[in-house]
Image (cartoon, grey):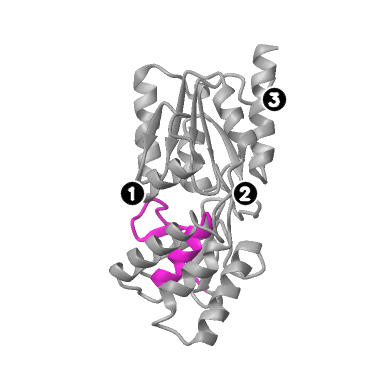
């Protein structure tokens, strides 16, 4: 049986899920830090960011950021397994008890989260963050940095036989709508949610689905950020698909399916459709 055979509601993330583009991180970090650091320091920070993504740095995807204690830590077997300073130096933690849902914590789940780590580390002002975000998002829809459409993926989603297709992104307006228009997917989903505030927004939506009468096994979530996109669904017994070219360390759950590219995701969704209809 295909792992998504029982799915009736399919929830899709946007960034890193419906398209994949990672060169933005260099420009985004540069815009954030160019008035704060020297050109050499900005260059070093960009290199470090890509080392984090590649798993070549003590701080890695899958770690949690503690804003108050100014540490990054790996959570494993219900405790802090390792902790590092924001410079990547291993730290001794006096207490390994932690509430992962605390507002002082943030999860390093995708490239945007890595950029947010540097926002916290260097205490970048809100207006600077908004300006840098808006600049890089607009560039991603313009040559020479424009994102690529994956037609096989959109075709697979269109043919996916589920009762409800849901688009859910933490990207706020108007950028979220601009990306939807650029990708030409305005009619692909039954519901569109922007600034969804995942993972809490995902948990609330899953609760709503269960109250409507859907069973956990009817719910499928697909995304590149395990904490935001997958954990709230997996926690109630739903199905999950992680799409990422990177390794997430210390996963608190194993996705039902893991793919590296949008083309592979298209193949997985197409196989599910064939199995049901064939």
Crowdedness of circle 3 by 10 Å Cα count: few (<14), some, many (20+)? some
Decide which of tag 2 and tag 3 comes sooner along the chain.
2
Residue 261 vertical placement versus 156 (above, below): below
| Residue 103 locus on image (x, y percent) | 33, 56
Identify the residue under disc 1: 174
| Residue 232 locus on image (x, y percent) | 45, 38
Residue 186 vertical placement versus 63 (above, below): above
| Region of the chain picked out in magenta, as a range | 92-120
| Residue 228 locus on image (x, y percent) | 46, 46
Q: CA distance from mark 1 to mark 2?
A: 26 Å
Query: Magenta span has 108?
Result: yes
Identify the residue under disc 2: 244
Identify the residue under disc 3: 271
| Residue 210 locus on image (x, y percent) | 39, 23
Count how many numbered circles sit on residues in the image.
Answer: 3
Crowdedness of circle 1 by 10 Å Cα count: few (<14), some, many (20+)? few
Q: Residue at coordinates 45% horizontally, 71% vertically from top-left?
A: 118
Instruction: Mark yes or no: residue 62 visible.
Output: yes
Q: Dot 3 lies on which element?
A: helix
98 to the left or right of 269: left
Decide which of tag 3 and tag 1 comes sooner along the chain.
1
From the image, state whether disc 1 or disc 2 is nearer to you. 1
């Amino acid at each position: 049986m295909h792992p998504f055979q029982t799915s009736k509601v399919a929830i899709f993330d946007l960034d890193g899920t419906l398209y994949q583009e990672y060169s933005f991180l260099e420009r985004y970090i540069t815009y954030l830090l160019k008035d704060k650091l020297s050109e050499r320091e900005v260059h070093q920070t960009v290199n470090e960011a890509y080392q984090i993504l590649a798993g070549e740095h003590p701080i890695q995807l899958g770690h949690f950021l503690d804003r108050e204690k100014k540490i990054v830590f790996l959570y494993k077997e219900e405790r802090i397994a390792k902790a590092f300073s924001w410079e990547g130096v291993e730290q001794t933690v006096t207490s390994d008890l932690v509430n992962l849902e605390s507002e002082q914590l943030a999860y390093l789940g995708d490239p945007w989260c890595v950029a947010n780590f540097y926002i916290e580390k260097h205490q970048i002002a809100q207006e600077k963050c908004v300006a840098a975000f808006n600049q890089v998002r607009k560039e991603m829809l313009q040559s020479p940095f424009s994102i690529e459409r994956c037609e096989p993926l959109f075709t697979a989603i269109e043919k996916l036989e589920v009762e409800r297709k849901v688009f859910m992104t933490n990207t706020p307006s108007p950028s979220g709508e601009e990306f939807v228009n650029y990708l030409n997917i305005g009619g692909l989903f039954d519901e569109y949610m922007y600034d969804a505030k995942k993972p809490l927004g995902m948990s609330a939506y899953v609760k709503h689905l269960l109250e409507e009468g859907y069973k956990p096994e009817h719910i499928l979530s697909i995304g590149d950020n395990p904490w935001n996109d997958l954990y709230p669904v997996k926690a109630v017994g739903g199905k999950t698909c992680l799409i990422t070219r990177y390794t997430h360390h210390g996963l608190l759950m194993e996705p039902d399916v893991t793919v590296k590219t949008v083309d592979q995701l298209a193949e997985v969704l197409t196989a599910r459709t064939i199995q049901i209809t064939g």
